[in-house]
């Protein structure tokens, strides 16, 4: 398993966040969901709009395929590229250990 951390530094305006949320729902989630080996994505957002997206995939190649799928999408009508500047940085790590928490039955 591999994890990718994608960072969007804050502060980010409400307009940027709305544009990103629209892009995520309408364009990015469908593209990512079509990539084999994608396990799960968590979106973490601070009050100032700073965000870290954690994506878990079966292989490092799947993470590269996710990036290619996202970059291969075209902006939808009404999307403003000025409000979607892209990530500040991206890091990929092999998953070293997984802890399960909570009751099991």
Image (tube, rainbow, N blue to C red):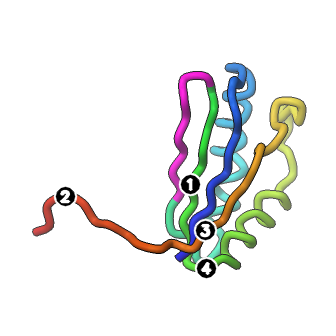
Q: Which residue is mark 2?
A: 102
Q: Is 84 contained in the magenta span?
A: no
- Residue span colored magenta: 41-48
Where residue 29 sits, quadrant-wise, is bottom right
Structural distance between the alpha carbons of marks 2 and 4:
27 Å
Marks 3 and 4 in Cβ contact (< 8 Å):
no
- Total marks in image: 4
Q: Secondary structure at mark 4?
A: loop
Structural distance between the alpha carbons of marks 3 and 4:
10 Å
Structural distance between the alpha carbons of marks 1 and 3:
11 Å
Q: Residue furthest left?
A: 105
Structural distance between the alpha carbons of marks 1 and 2:
21 Å
Q: Secondary structure at mark 1?
A: strand
Q: Which residue is mark 4?
A: 59
Marks 3 and 2 in Cβ contact (< 8 Å):
no
Frontmost of labels 3 and 4 is: 3
Frontmost of labels 3 and 2 is: 3
Point out residue 103 in the picture as x, y percentages from the top left corner: 14, 61
Main structural element of the magenta stretch: helix, strand or loop? strand
Q: Which mark is residue 93?
A: 3
Q: Height in image: 19 above or below 73?
A: above
Nearer-N-terminus badge (2/4): 4
At label 4, counting other C-alpha atoms closer than 10 Å, the crowd grade (few under 14, some 14-19, many 20 or more) is some
Nearer-N-terminus badge (1/3): 1
Q: Height in image: 50 above or below 63?
A: above
Q: Taking 37 as reference, is 72 left or right?
A: right
Which residue is nearer to you in this view: 78 or 45?
45
Frontmost of labels 1 and 3 is: 3
Q: Which mark is residue 54?
A: 1
| Picture quarter with the C terminus | bottom left
Where residue 23 sits, quadrant-wise, is top right
């Amino acid at each position: 398993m591999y994890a990718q951390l994608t960072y969007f530094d804050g502060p980010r305006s409400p307009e940027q966040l709305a544009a990103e949320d629209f892009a995520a729902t309408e364009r990015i989630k469908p593209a990512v969901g079509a990539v084999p080996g994608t396990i799960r994505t968590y979106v973490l957002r601070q009050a100032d709009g700073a965000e870290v997206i954690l994506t878990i995939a079966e292989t490092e190649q799947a993470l590269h395929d996710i990036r290619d799928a996202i970059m291969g999408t075209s902006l939808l009508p009404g999307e403003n590229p000025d409000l979607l500047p892209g990530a500040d940085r991206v890091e990929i790590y092999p998953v070293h250990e997984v802890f399960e928490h909570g009751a099991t039955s």
